[in-house]
Amino acid sequence: MFTIYVYVLDTLADWEIGYVTAELKSGRFFKEDAPSVSLKTVSDSKEPVHTMGGLTIVPDCLVEDIVVSKTSVLLLPGANTWNAPSRGAIMKKASEFLSFGAAVCAICGATAALAGIGVLNQRPHTSNGPGFLEMISPGYNGQSFYIDKPSVWDNNLITASSTGALLWAR
């Protein structure tokens, strides 16, 4: 079984994760013998989260409840609140996932959060443009690894721009 953790935070760009969560939950395109998937929302507290689209999400679990394994995946959606100090715990967990070899998938604003902790300085990646990462994440110096495509895969890291949701889900 795979456990997919979807980090939820206020101002979450709900449309950016729609393709991937719908397909993971439905499994309609999975091979017949594919392992099952458990989809869990995770946040810094159990307080309801309000998305940009006006949806309210009550997290299933907390960041400290995440179990990192080869069969766990962390999805980091875009949001306007990635620069809040409370994001440190999930960024630490994302680094743990990557070090362990587990998958991390970040789109839009979440790529800036990864850039802010240096994850994108030595790995192929994309985002909303290299200027975006430089503007939002002053410590970012991975320009030579930036690939101007909607979605980029590098081993256990998948990044996408705000327009790359469908390719990111694929």
Image (spheres, rainbow, N blue to C red):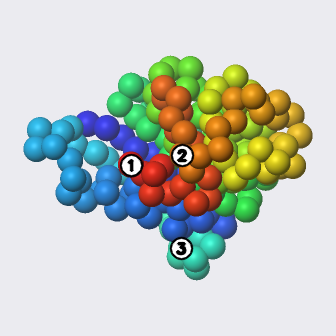
Give the alpha-carbon distance from disc 2 to disc 1, as whole Å: 10 Å
Q: Please state if 37 lies on the left or on the right of 151 as rendered.
A: left
What residue lies at 53% left-to-right and 73% top-to-bottom?
Answer: 56
Q: Please state if 70 lies on the left or on the right of 74 as rendered.
A: left
Give the alpha-carbon distance from disc 3 to disc 2, as whole Å: 27 Å
Q: Are marks 1 and 3 in contact (CB under 8 Å)?
A: no
- Label 1 neighbourhood size at 10 Å, few (<14), some (14-19), many (20+)? few
Write down the residue under mark 2.
Answer: 151
- Label 3 neighbourhood size at 10 Å, few (<14), some (14-19), many (20+)? few
Q: Please state if 42 lies on the left or on the right of 124 as rendered.
A: left
Indicate the amino acid at tag 1.
Arg
Give the percent coordinates (x, y) of residue 121.
74, 27
Give the percent coordinates (x, y) of residue 12.
61, 63
Which is nearer the eye, 170 or 8? 170
Upstream in the sequence, badge 1 or badge 3?
3
Image quadrant of residue 163?
A: bottom right
Q: Vertically, is 125 above or below 37?
A: above
- The dot on residue 56 is 3
Write down the residue under mark 1.
Answer: 170
Indicate the amino acid at tag 3.
Thr
Q: Vertically, is 7 above or below 141?
A: below
Secondary structure of the residue carrying tag 1 is loop
Upstream in the sequence, badge 2 or badge 1?
2
Which is nearer the eye, 57 or 169? 169
What residue lies at 22% left-to-right and 43% top-to-bottom?
Answer: 36
Upstream in the sequence, badge 3 or badge 2?
3
What residue lies at 20% left-to-right and 47% top-to-bottom?
Answer: 30
Q: Are marks 2 and 1 in contact (CB under 8 Å)?
A: yes
Q: Nearer the viewer, mark 3 or mark 2?
A: 2
